Image: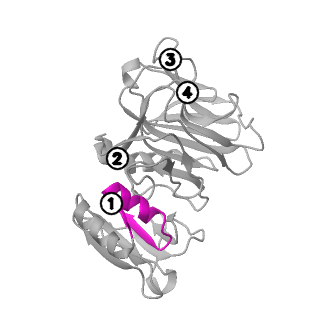
Amino acid sequence: MPNLFKSGNTATNGSIYDGNFTIGVDSTFDFGPTSTTGFWNGITPPSGGYTIYQNKAANGPSIRTAANDSALISILQGLGSTGTTAAGALNWARQQTEIMVANIDYYDIVTSGLTFVVDASYAPSYPRSGTTWYDLTRNGNNVSNTPATWASTLGGTISRSNQTNIFSTLIPSATGTSYTMCAFVNVSGTVNGPGSQIFGTTNTLGPSINVSSSPAMSAITFNSVTVTKPGSDFKQWNYFVGVQSGSTQLFYVNGTLSGTTSATNTSFGAFLNFGYIGAKTVSMTMGSFQLYNRALSQTEVTKNWNALRTRFGL
């Protein structure tokens, strides 16, 4: 089903954001008639192509489709872009608050409590080149790095090797003792140190998802929960979800609850100041990351897993 669109970036149930576009994605919510909610139906991008949205004063956005990269470049040049490649055109579009280019209908993920989401397969989040991975929430918690290696594989992925391409930022979340961290990654290379960070805080005591090298590639950890697996299990796509629910920690792997313990971890600053995606000693290919300021239920974890896994052939 095509995503829904309206002008503005005010917090709206069920939505993600790009500039002055609010994008309805979460089927949990009833977006109602346009006369009530202001949402208009979008157009699903053609396979290998794009849908270009341009806000106008009334009656929803102006919508064009581009069948391929050449058509995209031509249309955006007509709107003011100087980009001569698809990546250049997409980067120009990402800087425009009233123009948005979608290459897919974004996935039906849980949006309640969502404070951070980046996705390598979605052009508004990563426009195929550059040093910024754009947050799709209204918080604007973009992350930056040395230039990443983007590939069109599986709809779009970003790779990094040991000691390079570390995305970093400080992402403030809400205070409290409940949160959820999610990472869809393939730990494809060698882990060169214990506690190699997939997603987590700059403070080693803070909340994080790590993979261990003792023994090599043998365990994945969320805070105080450790799940032991054969090393080969990490060298494929996995969806790791860590849930801190009050004094209970739950760790899901590919939608299945794989470990739980009684412990609390809110030890960095007022709450969570996330510093790294793919830090220091772990090589991996990255699909998407989500951060919530509340504990997701098992039903919600399963919803995200089912929404995101198809592109990875899972």
Q: Secondary structure at mark 2?
A: loop
Crowd tier of the residue under label 4, counting other residues whose Cα lies within 10 Å: few below 14, some 14–19, many 20 or above: some
* Residue corresponding to mark 4: 280
* Residue corresponding to mark 1: 103
Residue type, label 1: Asn
Please tell me in which quadrant of the rendered image residue 87 appears. bottom left
Q: Secondary structure at mark 1?
A: loop
* Residue at 61% across, 33% down: 208
Instruction: Give the position of the C terminus as an image quadrant.
Output: top left
Q: Secondary structure at mark 3?
A: loop
* Residue corresponding to mark 3: 192
The image position of residue 103, as x and y in percent, is 33, 60
Where does the magenta region start and end? Answer: 81-102
Q: Secondary structure at mark 4?
A: loop
Q: Is residue 25 visible?
A: no
- Please tell me which of labels 2 and 1 falls first in the chain: 1
* Residue corresponding to mark 2: 156
Residue type, label 4: Lys
